[in-house]
Image (cartoon, rainbow, N blue to C red):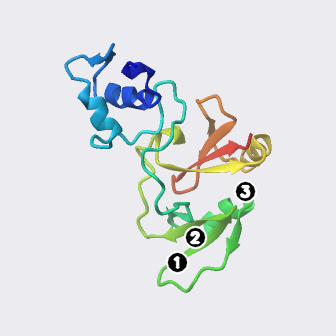
């Protein structure tokens, strides 16, 4: 059996391609086959879960801690003005927040939360990419792309459409925080 016939070789090939090597028969250009064996035994690390075709492969590292996202915090300059956008325009619901020594608000976003943290000097708005998909952002799943787009238009909120071809759009809040909204399929 050649390495190309090995069911694990797709991941191995991808990892080595990422390192700049190519599989040629049973050998690699400039590397001996033992690199595959070391990779398969976990002696070389490649943490990607995707092969060259973009197909999800089994993870090489388990989710030992069962991660899920609880909340994302966004810095805002004025909590009350931000609540107008997040609650009145987007339709999020404000939830109880413990008495913290700084202003802010917590919002329900499905089973997760958005925490608005008010600071005197939030991140600069100038110099950020025009399209929010090229900036740090929080992504939300939504039921209706068209309905949200109408709400944004009615509120005069500028937005850009996703360049990926998905039914998704990006906008920014009044403090420049980028938000992505993706229609559930």
Q: Please tell me the numbered disc located at residue 54.
A: none
Give percent across and percent down for residue 39: 31, 36
In which quadrant is the N terminus drawn?
top left
Marks 3 and 2 sit apart, C-alpha to C-alpha, by 15 Å
Seen from the viewer's position, the closer of residues 39 and 158 is 39
The residue under label 3 is 89
Q: In terms of secondary structure, where does tag 3 sit? A: helix
Q: In terms of secondary structure, where does tag 1 sit? A: loop
Specify the farthest residue to the left: 30
Query: For the point 28% across and 40% down, which residue is it?
Result: 44
Q: In terms of secondary structure, where does tag 2 sit? A: helix
Seen from the viewer's position, the closer of residues 58 and 50 is 58
Marks 3 and 1 sit apart, C-alpha to C-alpha, by 21 Å
Question: Within 10 Å of the Cα at label 3, are there few (<14), some (14-19), or many (20+) other Cα atoms?
Answer: some
Give percent across and percent down for residue 38: 27, 37
Specify which label sits upstream in the sequence, 3 or 2.
Answer: 2
Query: For the point 71% across and 63% down, which residue is it?
Result: 92
The residue under label 1 is 103
The answer to whether residue 79 is left or right of residue 102 is right
Specify the farthest residue to the front: 1
Give percent across and percent down for residue 20: 28, 24
Query: For the point 31% across and 42% down, which residue is it?
Result: 45
116 vs 36: above or below: below
The answer to whether residue 17 is left or right of residue 89 is left
Marks 1 and 2 sit apart, C-alpha to C-alpha, by 7 Å
The residue under label 2 is 79
Query: For the point 52% across and 40% down, which residue is it?
Result: 133
Seen from the viewer's position, the closer of residues 108 and 44 is 44
**C-beta proximity under 8 Å, tags 1 and 2:** yes
In which quadrant is the C terminus drawn?
top right
């Amino acid at each position: 059996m050649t390495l190309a016939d090995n069911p694990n070789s797709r991941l191995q090939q991808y990892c080595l391609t990422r390192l700049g090597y190519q599989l040629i028969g049973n050998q690699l250009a400039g590397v001996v086959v033992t690199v595959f064996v070391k990779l398969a035994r976990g002696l070389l690390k490649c943490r990607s879960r995707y092969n060259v075709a973009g197909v999800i492969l089994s993870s090489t590292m388990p989710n030992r801690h069962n991660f899920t996202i609880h909340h994302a915090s966004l810095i805002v300059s004025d909590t009350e003005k931000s609540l107008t956008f997040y609650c009145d325009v987007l339709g999020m619901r404000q939830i109880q927040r413990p008495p913290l020594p700084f202003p802010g608000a917590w919002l329900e976003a499905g089973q997760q939360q958005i925490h608005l943290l008010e600071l005197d000097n939030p991140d600069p708005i100038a110099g950020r990419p025009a399209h929010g998909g090229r900036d740090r952002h929080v992504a939300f799943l939504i039921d209706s792309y068209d309905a949200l787009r109408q709400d944004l238009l009615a509120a005069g909120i500028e937005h850009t459409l996703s360049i990926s071809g998905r039914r998704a759009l990006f906008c920014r809040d009044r403090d420049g925080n980028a938000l992505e909204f993706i229609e559930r399929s």
